[in-house]
Amino acid sequence: MIRRRTDRGQAVVVAVLAMPVILGMVGLALDVGYLRATKRQMQTAADSAAIAGALALNDAPPDYNQLATNAAGADGFTNGISGIAVAVNSPPTIAAPAGPCVTQPTSCVEVIITQSKPVLFAAILGAGSFTVAARAVAWGEANAKGCVYLLGPTGTDISAVGSNRISATCGIYVDSNSDPGVALTGANTVNSAFFGVVGGTPSEIGANSVNPPAITGIPPVPDPLANLPIPPISTPCSGGSTWPNITGSGLVVTIPSGSCYNVNIIGTGNTVTFSPGSFGNVSITGSLNIVTFGAGQYGSIQMSGANTTTFYPGQYASIVDTGSNAEIFNAGTYVIAGPGGLTLTGASGSVGNGVTFYIGPNAGSVSYTGANGSNFSAPTTGPYAGILFFQSPANTHTATFTGANGLIAGTLYFPRAPVTMTGANGITSNYVILVAYSLAMTGANTWTFNNNYTVLPGGSPIHTAALVE
C-alpha cells in the first residue's frame, strides 16, 4: 500500500486533537486514585471520631460532640478548615437497620465528615472538584474486654505468694510501669483471655504458670469507673440520749426515731426493731437476738456474740461484726461514713442481694471474712448496677478478704486502695470485676473472674465503644 504524505499529516492532526482527551482520561484515573486515598483517610478519621464520641457519652457531663470533633482533627480532618465539615450526632440521623443503635439510639454517636476536594487533571474535562464523604457510627455501651484493672502507676500491682490461682475469661490490665509490676512467688497460676502490663516482664520465682504470657509495654488504662456518681453523705445526729439497756430475755422492743438514741442490747433472745429514722451508736453484745435496723441514719454499729441482724439501706458510721452474727442486707445502697469502716465475719453466712456498699472518703477499711453460706450480689439496675463495693478514690485504706468467701457477684471497686486476699478464698460467680490500686494474694486463694453479664440488662458496668456502622 502506498502511504501519502496527506495520510501522515492526518494522523498527526488526529493525535493532536485526541491528546486532551487522552490526558484527561489519564488525569481522571489519577484523580480517582487520589480521591479514594482521601476517602480511606477520611473513613479512618470518622471511625476514630465516632469511637471517641461514644466513649464520651459515659462522661459526666457528656461532651461527645467536642471529643469526636477533636479526634477527627487529630487524624487530619479539622472542622472548618480547608472546606472540611465534621458533623456529630447522637442519636444518629440515619436510622440503623438493626443492632444496638435501634434499641439504644441515644447510646450511639454518628460522625459524618465531608470535604470538597479540587481535582487536578480531570479539570481538563470540565470537572472542578468532587465532594468526598465518610460516615461512621459507634455504640458506647459495649461490654469492656477487661475485668481486672490494677491502677497503681508504680510498684508491684500484683503480688502472689503461695499457690494462688487467678482465672479470668476476660482481660487483666496492670498499669504499673515498674520492672517488675507483677511478682509471682511459689506455685501460682494466672490464666486469662489477655494479660497486659505497662512495665516489664513479670517476676516469677518457683513453679508459676502464666497463660498466655504477659504482653508488656501496653499504654496505661485509665480508671474505667471514674464517672460513677458519688452518694451523698449527711451530717449524723448528735446529742442523743441512751435508750434503757435491753438486758432481758424474750423481749419485743421497738425503738422509735426522733431522739437519736444510743442503744445497748445485752440480753438473750430478744426481738429489737429500729423504726426508720436517725439513731446514734448501737452495741449488740448478747446472743440469739433478732435485730432489725430500719432505713435511715446510724452511728457505729458494733456487734459481737451470735445474733441475727437485718439491715435496710441508709448511712452508717460503721458496721463492725467481731462475733459470729448472721447479717442480712436488704437491697439498696449502704453508705459507710465513719472511721470504723465495714467488718463482716460472715461466720454464720451473711447475705445481701442487690446491694452496694459505698465506703466514704473518711471511712475506715473493708474487712470481709466469708463463709460457704455467704452470698452477696450487686444491683442489676440503677446507677450502681453491677457495683458491689465502691470505695471513694479519696480513701486509701486496704480492703481485706479472708477465708472462704462464698458467692460474690459484682464489682469490687477500690481505685486508690490495695486489695489483699489471705487464707483460702474462693470467689466465683457469673461475673466478678476487680478495679483496685493493687492486689496482693497470700496462701491458696482462687479468684475466678467470669464475664457473663446476662443478669445485668445494661451489660458490664464497664463500657467501651464499638463500631456498628
Image (cartoon, rainbow, N blue to C red):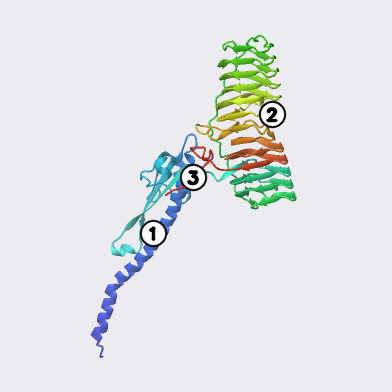
- Residue 289 in percent (x, y) is at 66, 18
Query: Of residues 256 and 349, which is closer to you in this image?
Result: 349
Q: Give the residue pinned by disc 3.
A: 465
Local packing at callout 1 (Cα closer than 10 Å; few below 14, some 14-19, many 20+) is: some
Q: Which residue is mark 1?
A: 35
Mark 3 and mark 2: span between their CA atoms? 42 Å
Give the label on residue 127, or none: none
For the residues marked 2 and 1, what is the alpha-carbon distance in whole angstroms?
70 Å
Which circle, 1 or 3, is nearer the viewer?
Answer: 3
Tell me which corner region of the image, top left, top right, bottom left or bottom right, holds residue 256. top right
Q: Nearer the viewer, mark 2 or mark 1?
A: 2
Amino acid type at circle 3 is Ala
Nearer-N-terminus badge (3/2): 2
Q: Position of residue 212 (x, y in %)?
A: 64, 52
* Residue 283 pos. (x, y %): 68, 17
Would residue 251 be seen by someone viewing this image from the given angle? yes
**Circle 2 is placed at which residue position?**
347
Tell me whether the residue at label 3 lies in contact with that at label 2, contact meaning CB atoms closer than 8 angstroms. no
Q: Residue at x 56, y 43 (%)?
A: 451
Closer-to-camera residue (380/364): 380
Tag 1: residue type? Leu
Tag 3: Cα neighbours inside 10 Å, few (<14), some, or many (≥20)?
many
Q: Residue at x 64, y 32 (%)?
A: 374
Residue 312 placement: quadrant: top right
Residue 49 versus residue 35 in the image, above or below: above
Q: Amino acid at mark 2?
A: Ala
